[in-house]
Amino acid sequence: MLPLATAARMKELDRRAIQERGVSSLNLMENAAQAVAQAVWELLQPEEDGFSPVLGSFSSMIVMRKKDAPPPTDEEERQVAELREIVESKNTDPTPRIAVFCGPGNNGGDGVAAARLLMGMGPCQVRAFFVGDRAKMTPDEKAMEDKLTAAGGRLEDFSVDMTDRSTLEATMTYEQQKLLTWLSTCDVMVDALFGIGLTRPVTGVFRTAVLQMQSRMHCPVVACDVPSGVNVDTGEILGEAVQAKVTVTFTRGKPGLYSGPGAERAGEVRIVDIGIPWELEHQMFGTLPRLEVVRQPDSQLPCRPRSAHKGDFGKIFILAGSEGYTGAPVLAARAALRTGAGLVYLGVPRDIYPIVAVKCDEAMPFPLPEDCSAVLERARGCDVALIGPGLGRSPGAEQLVLSLLAELDMPVVLDADGINALAGHIDVLDRRSAPTVLTPHEGEFSRLTGCALPIRDRLSAARDFARDHGCILVLKGQGTVTAAPDGSAWINASGNPGMAKGGSGDVLAGMIAALLGQKHLRQERDNTPELVTAAVCFHGLAGDLCARKFGEYAMLPSDLIDTLPEILRKWTEES
């Protein structure tokens, strides 16, 4: 697991390092720039990662003329020839071309320093562009510009504004055309416009710079700290955002690089140490609730005790299924068994029991009795209850869910219609003392809370709900967020779009219930959040293995269950 930090926390950490510990801000900037320059240089090595610069071809769009326009003048023909030469020279001059876009803040200073360092790393053409108001340039960035100038470079002003495309052709100067033509031939671009401070939509010349980095399909972008246009705390896209191939982020990861649309824009995320004292970081974050990204489990599963029997590995009660939804209960039960549950009792409505019974070999299905007290008695004999997969939303089903929640003194996992039953009855959840885990997707979370879709800040939404209602919330989606009542949260980085199929959530719910029910996995302190987080990660890792085996289009939720043995065996201690 990798620790994360919000923008506010990172700004405070930087401030304290510089003002209280005497760390040189210029040294921090140099270290950040070195990591960015190294990432750029690696992208220019085709034999190492398969990157191959695209040879230029002249675009007539630059010199498109109206049909009734007079013949070009000698000067216009000279300009066309010069523009063509810029592009076609790529076929004869293999020297890499690198563009570095720098904003007026310290993130821009990182870019200016990276441009200087790249000039000294080998043969390349490096051009650094200043975007914005020079009056807002920070002292550190100005110091880096002086170093760039001393090294023979120049920080050029970038003033092209594509906000009004209808007048762009008429207002663009020849020098601006030359600039855009050269940019079209770049091999790598560096995004150092904003960093972690952006909270409003990108506009004006900044938007033009972002669009330049977006439009070069074969030109990878290295982003400094965060792709410009991405809200670093939420992953929200602020109008337009850079699509990075590599994001070099400093000291700690940032939530917006792993959750929401920002996760797609970040590309490969590299977290680099730039010289913040470790003890200061520990002092600041050591007493705060955990905020981490999970790429793989925090530790391996312990070996199962040799003297244990099936009851020690959890008796799981599952309430699931309805007419037309016979697959959900079976998937949940199979997933629970594959994740180590000792016994799985599967209660389904009587009218679908014959279908479910045929599909189950290891799980023990039974038709639900009409008497609610009999269902409660059956559930009380188990260690964990999973309620909701495919259950339906009939009044009887909703009342049964609420009764079980109110009466059961054991961990309960609520999924799908189990969550829907809580809408308007959140007080039932609030009165529970035993651990409760909710696993909604955004639509179910919206029905439960009334929040608008799409959820702009998934991390805060999950943390607030978990804290306010004393539960574990698993907000599913890209960068699934697991939040605990104490404010701790984990963003899952495993998984892929091939898992976005009906039934994947049922598998996850069964896996969570199975881990919660195994006595040897529980600790003296309540480690429910950690076990839930592990289940989410295993689920994503199984999905990634399925994608490698079958492809994202063809993989099925049942394939997740079939690949669990390989995943769990890898993450189990050897005896």
Image (cartoon, grey):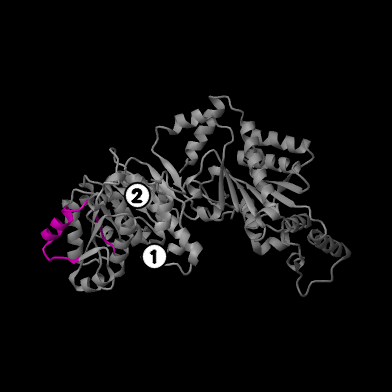
- Residue 385 in the magenta stretch? The answer is yes
User: Quarter of the image containing the N terminus?
Assistant: top left
Residue 494 horizontal side relative to residue 359, left or right: right
Of 552 and 214, nearer the camera is 552
Q: Are marks 2 and 1 in contact (CB under 8 Å)?
A: no
- Residue 535 in the magenta stretch? The answer is no
Residue 461 seen in the figure: no
Residue 505 horizontal side relative to residue 398, left or right: right
Q: Name the quadrant containing residue 298.
A: top left
Residue 23 at x, y percent in the picture: 59, 27
What residue is drawn where x is 47% and y is 58%? 544
User: Quarter of the image containing the C terminus?
Assistant: top left
Question: Callout 2, which amino acid?
Answer: Val
Farthest bottom residue? 67
Q: How many discs appear? A: 2
What residue is drawn where x is 44% and y is 60%? 543
Disc 1 residue crowd, few under 14, some 14–19, many 20+, Cα 10 Å:
many
Of 503 and 467, nearer the camera is 503
Of 20 and 37, nearer the camera is 37
Measured Cα–Cα span from mark 2 to mark 1:
19 Å
Determine which residue is flagged by label 1: 557
Identify the magenta region. Answer: 366-389
Residue 47 at x, y percent in the picture: 70, 55
Determine which residue is flagged by label 2: 532
Which numbered disc flags the more N-terminal residue, 2 or 1?
A: 2
